[in-house]
Amino acid sequence: MEELKLAGSMGNARFHNDTSKSVQRYLKFDKDLSFTDITSAFLEKYEAYLRSQGGTDGGIGVRMRSIRALYNHAIRRNIVKESLYLFRAYKVSRLKGRGAKCALTFEEVKQIINVDLSENPELLNSKNYFVFSFYTRGMNFADMMKLKWKDIKGRNIYYTRSKTGVAITQYTPYLDGLYYLEKELDVNREIVNDTIN
């Protein structure tokens, strides 16, 4: 985990650290765990423990992917033999989050668009990010933060998806959304500096 911190992968380090603490709680802090202790039976018992603590497939999957990543790292470092790889038998892919998705109605979105934030100006940026994402059919925050005005031409937005590196040309039928944002940015000049370069 120290290597991940040094490499700038703080998110991954935190992810593995949280899993390590969870495994220690499962083991009741009474023993150190070696890679040879991690078997399919161990993973099944650990999964049962997580379920008994209210864990869902999505959350358990996060823990198991962390263990798998560390196990793969140990194989690459010749700490454990590849022949002992247990994730052929224990399938992490079956642990997918099945949380109920709940979409806002168009009326609820309109309420957000029209909400008066004069008494809570600190929420204005958040509102504008949400509205812009809505009008651009769900553009994520990381991609919004990299947009420049020159990336918006007519009804199209041109950008490279941060997560995948894929170049996107997004047709935006909701041009009024872009005008909405431009109007808001004209009224609140500091947002221009904070959001769109």
Image: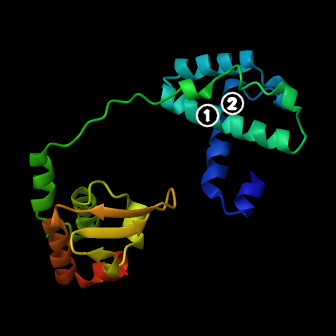
* Helix, strand or loop under label 1: helix
Q: Which residue is mark 1?
A: 63
Between discs 2 and 1, the one toward the N terminus: 2
Q: Which marked residue is nearer to the observer: mark 2 or mark 1?
A: 1
Q: Toward which corner of the image does residue 133 lie, by quadrant?
A: bottom left
What is the quadrant of residue 34 in the picture? top right
Seen in the picture, residue 85 relative to 157 is either above or below; the reply is above
Task: Tell me where residue 117 appears, x and y as whole percent.
Answer: 15, 66
- Left or right, residue 104 beside residue 59: left
For label 1, count other residues whose C-alpha is less than 10 Å away and answer few (under 14), some (14-19) or many (20+).
many
Determine whether the residue tagged by mark 2 lies in a helix, strand or loop: helix
Mark 2 = which residue?
23
Is the residue under label 1 in contact with that under label 2 (CB below 8 Å)? Answer: yes
Say which residue appears at 74% left-offset and 40% top-offset: 70
Q: Which mark is residue 9?
A: none
Q: Position of residue 74 (x, y in %)?
A: 83, 40
**Residue 117 visible at all:** no
Give whichever of 52, 126 is nearer the camera.
Answer: 126
Q: Residue at x 67, y 21 (%)?
A: 90
Judge the density around disc 2: few (<14), some (14-19), many (≥20) Cα neighbours within 10 Å.
some
Image quarter hosting the C terminus: bottom left
CA distance separating discs 2 and 1: 9 Å
What type is the residue that disc 2 sits on? Val
